[in-house]
Amino acid sequence: MIRLKSIFIKNYRSIGSEGITIEFPENQPVVIIGENNSGKTNILRAVDVLFGEWNPKYKEFEAWDFFNRSEENIIELKAEIEQFDGMLRESSSTLKRLELKVEKGKQNVLTIINEDGSNDERQANYVREQIASIFIMSERNLAYQLSYANKYTLLSRVTKRFHESLVENKERVEALKHYYESIIDVFNEVEEFKEFKKMISGSMNNFLSNMSYALGIDFSAYDPSNYYKNLRLVPVENNVVRELEELGTGQQQILAISLAYAYAKAFKSDSSLILIIDEPESHLHPMAQKYVAKVLYEMAKNGLQVIISTHSPYFVDLEYLEGINVVRRENGSTRVKQIRREGLARYCQEHGATKASPDKIVPFYAKSATPSILRGLFSKKVVLVEGPSEELALPIYLEKVGLDLVKEGIDVISVGGKGEIPKWWRFFTVFDIPCYVCFDNDSSKDNGRKKTTDILNTIGMAEKNFYNDFIEDNWVITASCCVFEKDFEDSLRKHFKEYTMLEENVRNQLGDSKPLVAREVALALCTSHFREDDEGWQKFRKLKDVLLKLRR
């Protein structure tokens, strides 16, 4: 089946003159991740410009479509296409890609480039017709896709394809015409209807004598230009037909996705469909997000090309690593980081995981990835900690000393133990996400300091005699790591005078849950029991400064 292999985008909206390339791995969805205003939706729109509703050759591009609103920039979109061999009309050439060039003041140029380097503008429209994109936006509801608003809605596309298949058989066409005429004869047996027709064709024309148009009766079920034009798709609940307006926005979005999939499956052998979805999590509660994500991944596995932008970790599955694209703004331009399994394995080897291999690296990460850990892909910076106590309490202390974690895009993430820190440091940094680590220095739980050594080797701090700084009665904060004394709680007990007392009070009231105790004590120290002279605040201020300076 014809498929989009990659797209190169240059000087389009937030994407600058260096351009970006998005690869479309086979049988995997392309997942675009990034903060607001990073350029995610611009990537989706670029795909839709080439393969969507309107022919880009005749599209009028606005000032904001050009990078930096500079109309001196030339927009370039290049889509590499696979499995199109032998399909070009009147040509023996092999198609390589479809290109669009937009230069202000000139006619847009849409052309194909063949493997031999030749180009052909005449065949470009034909190629576009073989690859259609459907763009489902969070603000566009199901009613649009189930309408005949234009020939590019899903319903228009579906009925057009049905019609094309039907008219291939002349006998079926004649039979339909005969059946329609028989149905009209039945309507004509109604006296009131006969009288109405007479009025339309006779006396009413007296009122219309000076006009070129008259009124006639048309049964829309019979339309030789599209025999399926009368087809309607309606929501049904418990065998009761409902109005589209009765459905919530989330339900409408799910049904629109289902319709696109049905269309793709029905005509799988004839052409290719690219399903583009902007923020599929919109209007969906978490369980519904998980369901929709599962459906989209199944669609991709079955051959449908899916590209989505998302803010939800439920739509990220590390089993499909090569479809993940982390998007960010750098120097005013959208940049993208996409990694292959070979690249991830090589990066891990370079940072201490010498046994990492391309065939095992994806399941190694996928089996332990949780939505909580995957939040890091949506962050500007990540702070990795051992457990939930630090994850709950650290943000409270840092906010108290003036670090706005939300504003700075910093996420504190528990990875489930000290031994997991190097693993996830490698993962986030390979996507160019700045990563800081916090861990305990309790030698009784770290045989021979193997875990500490692994962390330091991974982050590039394993210098000669460096470990002398990490004695168990010293809370160390460096540019790339924070090492607590014996453990997190022990450091806080030594540096906050009332910590032990508050710890006992919380245990008596709420029980022995370490994360709960850590959070409640942190809240108390930051409010009713705040003491400026506690040494711990100096430590957290230093940690705040380090995190603000953290870069890739």
Image (spheres, rainbow, N blue to C red):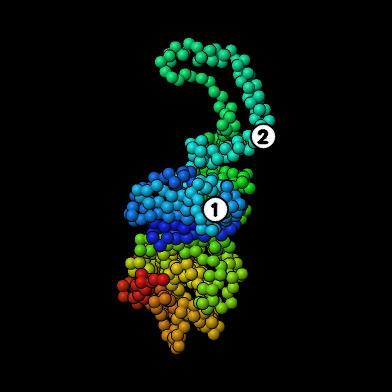
- Position of 359 relative to 76 (above/below): below
Name the amino acid type tagged 1.
Answer: Val
10 Å neighbourhood of mark 2: few (<14), some, or many (≥20)?
few
Viewer-side residue, 75 vs 115: 115
Q: What element carries label 2?
A: loop
Count the numbered circles shown: 2
Give the residue pinned by disc 2.
Answer: 169
Q: Which of 353 and 402 is in front in this view?
A: 353
Q: Nearer the viewer, mark 1 or mark 2?
A: 2
Q: Which residue lies furthest to the left in this view?
A: 532
The answer to whether residue 290 shows anywhere in this view is no
Q: Nearer the viewer, residue 247 or 137?
A: 137
Label 1 close to label 2 by CB (< 8 Å): no
Residue 38 pos. (x, y %): 40, 58
Residue 93 x, y percent position in the rendering: 57, 54
- Sequence-first disc among 1 and 2: 2
SS for tag 1?
Answer: strand
Tell me, yes or no, if residue 342 can be seen here. Answer: yes
Which residue is drawn at the image coordinates 45% and 68% (left, top)? 432
